Amino acid sequence: MKKLVESSGVEVAFKEVDVVTTGTFGAMCSSGAIINIGHSDPPIKIEKAWINDVPICHPGAAVDLYIGATATSETQSFEYGGGHVIEDLVSGKEVELRATAYGTDCYPRTRIKTNLTKDDLNQFYLLNFRNCYQRYACAVNSRDETIYTYMGKLLPRFRNATFSGAGELNPLMNDPDYETIGVGTRIFLGGAQGYVIGEGTQHDPQNLNGTLMVRGNAKKMSPEFLHGATFTRYGTTMYVGIGIPIPILNEGLAKKTAIRDEEIFTNIIDYGVPRRDRPKLGKISYKELKSGAITIDGKKVRVSSLSSLKTAKKIAGTLKSWIEEGMFYLTTPVERLPLDSVFKLMRQTEETSFIANVVHAAVTCKENEPIQAIAERIVKQSVNHIVVIDDAGKLSGIVTSWDITRAMAEGRKALADVVTRRVITAKIDEPLETASKRMAQHNISALPVINSERKVLGIVTSEDVAKILGR
C-alpha cells in the first residue's frame, strides 16, 4: 500500500485497494486470561489459587480466575509467570492448579489440587486491558550502572538504546483517528480471531499514544503468536500478536495507511532517572531506530528492538490470507474509540521523599593527600566516608573509615592503594526509596550525589535514609 501510494498516488490506491492489513508483536504486560475451571465435588469457593506456583487472581464467584501475565512464580522467581501459564495452556500442556478456601455450608471444600488442560476449562478467554501501543519510547540510561527495566537491559552512560513497536506497520499508526477501529472491530489476536472491546487503559490519543482493550478465545490461539517472556531482573510478561484490517473507505484512509517510518517520531527517554517525569533527550524516527544505531549528543549509540518486525509482517500477511479465503469477515465498529482522552498521573496524597531532602555536604579529599591527613579528617568530622574528587570537583572515588584504618595498619601511605574507583552514585532528584534499594543491592552504606557532569553535590548515607523512611 505504501509503495502503491508513492508510485501511483492516493487516488489510484483508493480505487485499487479495499483493505490494508497491519500487525504488531511485542511485550504487552497488561494482558491476561479469564478461565472457568468448573465445580469440584464437593464444591469449593476459591479464596486463593496458584497455577504452576504462579498466584492467580480470584476476581469473583467460586471458580472464575484471572491469570495476569506479569504475576511471577513463587518458586521460579522471574523465570516463569502468568504469561508462561497462558502459553502452556494455549499449547495444550497440562498445568497444576492448587486452591484454598475458608469453606461455607454450600461450598464446604477448603483445598484442592488437580491437573488441567485447556480442554478441561469451560471458558479460556484472553482479556487484555492495554495492548497495541500506538508508539513506544526509545529508552536509554544515563546512570553509571546497568539498569533492568520493562524496556530491557540498559547499559550505563548511554551505551545502548532500546525501542519497541512495528512503526509503519502498527495498526493504530495506520488509522490514527480510529475511523475503522472501535468497539466490536474483529481483529487477529494471538493466532485466532478476537475483538476490540474498547480503548485500552492509559489511552492517550492526543499524544499519539492510543491503546486497545481486546478479547479473544484463547482455546483457538497459537503459541506462535502468544509467548510468555521474562525481562531480566524486571519480571515476566507476554508477547501478543495483534493484526487489524483497515477498510479503505475514503482517500483520507488511503493516505493514512501510506505512512512511513520516517514520519513516525517518538521520544528518547532517560530511564536512568527513576521518576515519572523522566527527561526527554530528543525525538527520533522509527526509520532511525530500525537502522540499528542512533546519535545522542554526537555519540553513536547501538539500538535494538524488543519486538519482532518479522512476526508483525507474518501477522499482517496471515490476516490478508484469511480475508482473501473468506475465513475472516470485517466488522463495522458499534462505537468509535475516544479521541479526547487524557492520560492522568496518579493523585498522591502522601509526600514522596527525594534525595534532595536529605543530601548533605560531603567531606572530600584529593588523591594526592597523605592517608594520615584523611584519617584526622574522619575523626574531626565524625564521618565514615570521604569522597575523592579531582581539581574540578568531579568524582574520582571514595574511601571509608575502614579503608583508612586498614591502610594505616598495613603501613600504606598512598591513597591510590585503597580508594574505590567504581563508585555507586545517586542523583539529586531521585526518590529516597531508590537510594535505599541501591545501597541494599550493593551492600554499601553511602552514595555520593553527583550531577550529569559527575560533579559532587553531596552525599546521602544509610542513616539519612533510615531517619526519613523509618519515620
Image: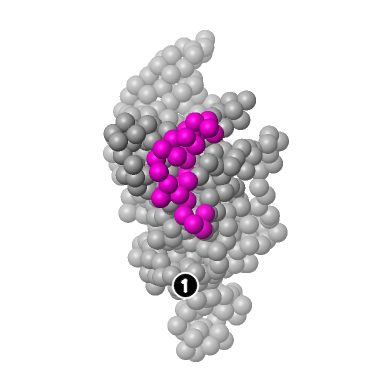
Q: Where is residue 450 shown, x and y percent of the image? A: 53, 50
Q: Nearer the viewer, residue 276 or 213?
A: 276
Please state if 307 lies on the left or on the right of 341 as rendered: left
Q: Which residues are magenta?
A: 365-393
Question: Residue visible at 57% across and 79% down?
Answer: 255
Q: Where is residue 22 shown, x and y percent of the image? A: 46, 67
Determine if residue 132 is in view.
no
Q: Nearer the viewer, residue 219 or 155?
A: 155
Sort mark 1 into few (<14), some (14-19) or many (20+) by Cα contacts within 10 Å.
Answer: few
Is 383 one of the magenta-colored residues? yes
Q: Which residue is mark 1?
A: 298
Corner quadrant of residue 294: bottom left
Please state if 93 lies on the left or on the right of 65 as rendered: left
Looking at the rendered structure, the secondary structure element under dot 1 is loop
> In the image, is residue 351 above or below residue 19?
above
- Give the residue type at disc 1: Gly
